[in-house]
Image (tube, rainbow, N blue to C red):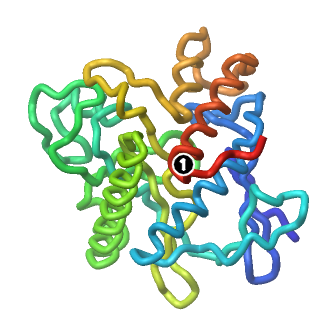
Amino acid sequence: MELIHSGKVRDVYADGDELILVASDRVSVYDVVLPTEIPDKGKILTQLSLWWFEQFADIIPNHVISEDVPAEWAGRAIRCRRLSMIPVEWIARGYLTGLGLKEYQKDGTVSGISLPPGLVDASRLPEPIFTPTTKAAEGHDEFITYADVVAEIGADTAARLKDVTLEIYKRGAALAAERGIIIADTKLEFGRAADGTLVLGDEVLTPDSSRFWPADEWEPGRPQHSLDKQFVRDWSSTLDWDRTPPGPAIPQDVVDATRARYIEVYERLTGTPWPS
């Protein structure tokens, strides 16, 4: 097998006409990979994604072929189809927070969508909205409008994937709500298979790609108790660090708390205990 790409978290290997997508235990904040790993993180991301792929199989095909991978990657890797990835980050938001909140505070909109006045951090939106961003190879992703997406990939593909993004978010959020978890927002990625079929790829509704909050602790107007990577971001924001490499080492108590949050999300969503 040939290593063809090493990302912030995932490594991609070519195995003939198929790919092996390996999720490491690395963690990145503000596009900087930190030197400390979170044990089991890659396995949790992979297993949770596989569970979600099954929930959405009737909405759109996904890239998963099997979990038939080399033994050293068991549990943290999937065998998948090659895709030509679409250069857009497909983001759905049901609550206002993070970069979306900052954009709203500046001009009352997110990705060109006007929102009601008076919203605060963690406000629930009247309806989930589609707020795409660029998919930057370097630097930070930036908000774009739906019109920008249409110009980039065409009206038919843009309309189809916008609808799929919102449908996946709404179904996932409803399922999570039954388990006492709010999914505030999420990021999806899509590509085209060799025959032109639109396919859901990468990861789905994980603590790396989404914001999860305990529903019984939700209170608009303040930062929420996060069950996702935001916990590491919040810790790093307390440091005298300019958000450029090299990143700071993560202390053990933050490592343990982060791992516990990822496991809690997995167990509450899937109903399956995480192996000790």
Residue furthest left in the image:
117
SS class of the residue under badge 1? loop
Locate residue 120 relative to residue 213 in the image: left or right: left
* Residue indicated by mark 1: 206
Give the answer, above or below, for where 212 lies relative to 225.
below
Image quarter where the N terminus lies is: bottom right
Q: Nearer the viewer, residue 246 or 189?
A: 189
Q: Position of residue 247 (x, y in %)?
A: 69, 24
Estimate the x, y position of residue 58 in percent, counting from the top left: 42, 78
Q: Residue at x 55, y 32 (%)?
A: 30
Q: Residues within 10 Å of mark 1 (few under 14, many from 20)?
A: many
Residue placed most toward the observer, 67 or 174: 174
Left or right for 146, reference 22: left
- Percent coordinates x, y for residue 124 in the rendering: 23, 37
Kind of residue indicated by mark 1: Thr
In this view, 46 is above or below 153: above
The residue at 54%/26% (across/down) is 231
Q: Which quarter of the figure is the C terminus placed in?
A: top right
| Count of numbered tags | 1
Q: Tell me which corner region of the image, top left, top right, bottom left or bottom right, holds residue 225.
A: top left
Q: Residue at x 16, y 34 (%)?
A: 108
- The percent position of residue 211, horizontal first and vertical second, equals 44, 39
Residue 62 occupies quadrant: bottom right
Q: Answer with the quarter of the image where residue 33 lies.
A: top right
